[in-house]
Amino acid sequence: MLESAASEEVIELGLKQFVLALSVALSVTALTQLIGRLRQVPYTLVLVMVGLALAFVDIRLVELSPELILLIFLPPLLFEASWNLKWGELKRQLIPVCLLAVFGVVIAVLGIAFGLHQVAGLSLTSALLIGASLAATDPVSVTALFRELGIGGSRLSTLTEGESLFNDGMAVVAFGFLVGLPLGTATLSVQSVLLQLVTVVGIGIAVGGVVGFGISYLTQRFDLPLVEQSLTLVATYATYLITEDLGGSGVIAVVVAGLVLGNYGSRIGMNPRTRVIVSEFWDFLAFFINSIVFLLVGDQIRYEGLLDNLGLIGVTVLSMLLARAIATFVLCFLSDRMTQSQIPIREQTVLWWGGVRGTVSIALALSVPVVLPEREDIISIVFGAVLFTLLVQGLTVKPMMIKLNLLDDQLVREEYLELAARQFALNRVLERLQSDKQPDIDPEFYRYQEALVKGEIDQTQTKIDKLKGEHPNLVSFIVEQFQEELMEVEANAYAELVKLGRLKEELSPTLEAALQEEGNQA
């Protein structure tokens, strides 16, 4: 009875802490939309600053642990990001994404470790663990930041989000290997490292693919939106847990499952209404978790630890930025030589500076075994570096993009897409007015409504023509959008035939190959 009572008290205390943290997070998020100046700052960064203020007065809402981050928060955030990542765009940027996700992590680990060991005199073991913790750009932070800046769906967004989704698995593998060196559970050899890497990544891809395609075919058998929505949530956690139990990378498995379900399963197994319901559910869940995570990141800071290690944090930040610069510019240069797609230097600059760290780095730092003597210093240094990337890089990436004329281009594209969507919707209304005239309604009413809608269509077209005249580069974007629309029509046709049982699997996109061949000839 005593054990049962104690367990109930723990559950009640945990629930109260969770509700308190959620209430604070949602209140802060609401205030950012009400106060004019705060609207210019991403709400995730405002939450970090509020968390820092709470930590300063020693108010701890919830004790953040690696298990809480890696098992509860991270899987749904990874799934939501990969669900919304377009495979067609990712495939076009696959070589630079893979180069940055694999070799970028190696360069970051070695660069940070070199700076801390050679310059600051930190032990090699601690330097390597800090390097592994900070090697990966964080998908939670990167995705939230870039979407708030309004650049979701662009090539820069695809490169940044794709890299951050895949390099997490690489960083976790590197950290697991390096943490085993001082404990005597791992040996340093190229063969063992490559074997472990292939095993972990291979298991992750295999499990994620099996779960993704399995649920894709399962949802073809019925049309129950709430059940299909629940299946995606269960699949997210099940994929992560099963893969980790098998010795693979749960991060990579969830990303693969999300990519398959978002780009394949949602087409062949879900009708349009269900896709909207599932997408809205994951948008809500990502917002819900992000609000808590970024508040708790700031709330976990121990100021005394930061002050004691201020010099080491400075060396870490400089080493991290230098290693990130080498990885970004060198690997993008190699990518340009290997592919037809060129990454402009201004996009590479944002790719370098926008590589913020976040929850994954904190989870890895908190995972350092207690038996290691420098554990507390490692945690403080990683927390300090993460805060720098979130507050300094996170707050300055938007001005940098404006200075480089990247955000302006994206805002123009967003404005065009909104106008085109409005014109498309108004044309649908006009078609309805002209084709479905009911005898009980006065014909004069129809004429008036048609004139009103035609006037709105003409005004929208005038705005589109003006926008194209002011921004000539918009024309090439419109052509790209139309080509993507044609390829989407082709892909949906294959998916519909699969759903009807007239095809066993989707065919290769003929139109995409033809367009690529035409581009090469040009």
Image (spheres, rainbow, N blue to C red):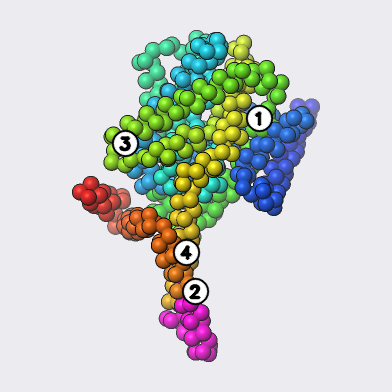
Q: Which residue is mark 2?
A: 456
Q: Nearer the viewer, mark 1 or mark 2?
A: 2
**Label 3 or label 1, whichever comes before in sequence order:** 1
Q: Nearer the viewer, mark 3 or mark 1?
A: 3
Residue 419 bears which disc, if any?
4
Crowding around mark 4 (Cα neighbors within 10 Å: few <14, some 14 to 19, many 20+) is some
Which amino acid type is marked by label 1?
Leu
Q: Residue at x 79, y 27 (%)?
A: 2
The residue labelled by disc 1 is 64
Which range of residues does the magenta coloring cover?
A: 432-457
Report the side of 469 relative to 127 (left or right).
Answer: left
Q: Earlier in the sequence, mark 2 or mark 3?
A: 3
Q: Earlier in the sequence, mark 1 or mark 2?
A: 1
Visible in this render: residue 350?
yes
How far, Cα to Cα, is label 1 from label 2? 53 Å
Q: Is disc 3 placed on a helix, strand or loop?
A: helix
Q: Quadrant of residue 395?
A: top right
Horizontal and vertical percent position of residue 3: 76, 27
**The one of 312 and 131 positioned closer to us in this rendering:** 312
